[in-house]
């Protein structure tokens, strides 16, 4: 299967028709969707951290490029707009790191909720996409080349927006958590 993103992962199709699962093969002590959704929470937590890693790689590439590339007789990093972009990028990355770190601390204590994990996944993926987009712009025409990692990260992050629950679904999970109302219908 040809893919533009998540190329290292195996993608396949599973088709189940007329499948019966004997009681002996059911997950023990699990009621409803709690078991499968618990697995989703762990995957979503991993995605929250993975998005931070992608953002850091894009940021690092933009920072290095800004220190090497000259424009109008100056390094790109000497321009105010470049410094603004880099400062905003590292600030957002640091906030996402702290969100994930705190969530990990809560998880270690058995206190992390699925809604908190959804919030982290949604926030961190959106942040990483924004960082990747800014990094691509900062690289100019070179930002779309294979010489830099940015487009690879952008393609992967575009997939991860919908992976393990879409951006909008995670927004609804957070909304339900803060209001107590189920908007899923």
Image (cartoon, helix red, strand yellow):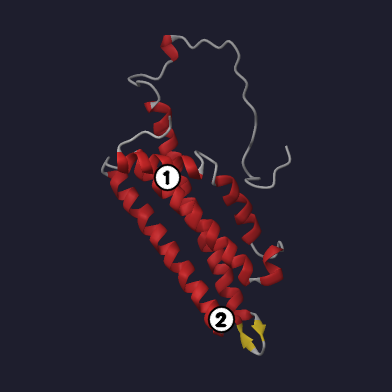
Residue shown at the point (61%, 75%) measured from the top left:
65
Quadrant showing the C terminus: top left
Where residue 87 appears, x then y in whole percent?
46, 73
Where residue 156 appears, x then y in whole percent?
60, 50
Q: Residues within 10 Å of mark 1 (few under 14, many from 20)?
A: many
Q: Are marks 2 and 1 in contact (CB under 8 Å)?
A: no
Q: Nearer the viewer, residue 91 or 58?
A: 91
State whether residue 46 is above or below residue 59. above
State whether residue 102 is above or below residue 94. above
Q: Is residue 74 left or right of residue 84?
A: right
Quadrant showing the N terminus: top right
List the residue tagged with mark 1.
45
List the residue tagged with mark 2.
77
Where residue 144 appears, x then y in whole percent?
70, 63
Kindly state the secondary structure of the residue where label 2 is placed: helix
Q: Residues within 10 Å of mark 2 (few under 14, many from 20)?
A: many
Residue shown at the point (49%, 39%) measured from the top left:
165
């Amino acid at each position: 299967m040809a893919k533009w993103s998540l190329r290292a992962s195996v993608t396949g199709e599973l088709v189940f028709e007329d499948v019966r699962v004997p009681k002996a093969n059911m997950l023990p002590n699990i009621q409803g969707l709690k078991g499968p959704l618990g697995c989703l929470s762990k995957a979503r937590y991993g995605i929250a951290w993975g998005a931070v890693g992608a953002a850091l790689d894009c940021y690092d590439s933009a920072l290095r490029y800004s220190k090497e590339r000259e424009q109008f007789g100056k390094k790109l990093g000497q321009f105010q707009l470049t410094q603004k972009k880099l400062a905003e990028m590292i600030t957002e990355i640091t906030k996402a790191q702290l969100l994930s770190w705190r969530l990990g601390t809560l998880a270690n204590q058995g206190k992390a909720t699925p809604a908190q994990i959804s919030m982290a996944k949604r926030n961190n993926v959106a942040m990483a996409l924004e960082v990747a987009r800014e990094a691509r712009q900062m690289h100019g025409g070179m930002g779309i080349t294979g010489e830099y990692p940015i487009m690879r990260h952008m393609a992967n992050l575009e997939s991860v927006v919908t992976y393990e629950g879409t951006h909008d679904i995670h927004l609804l999970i957070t909304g339900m958590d803060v209001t107590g109302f189920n908007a899923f219908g």
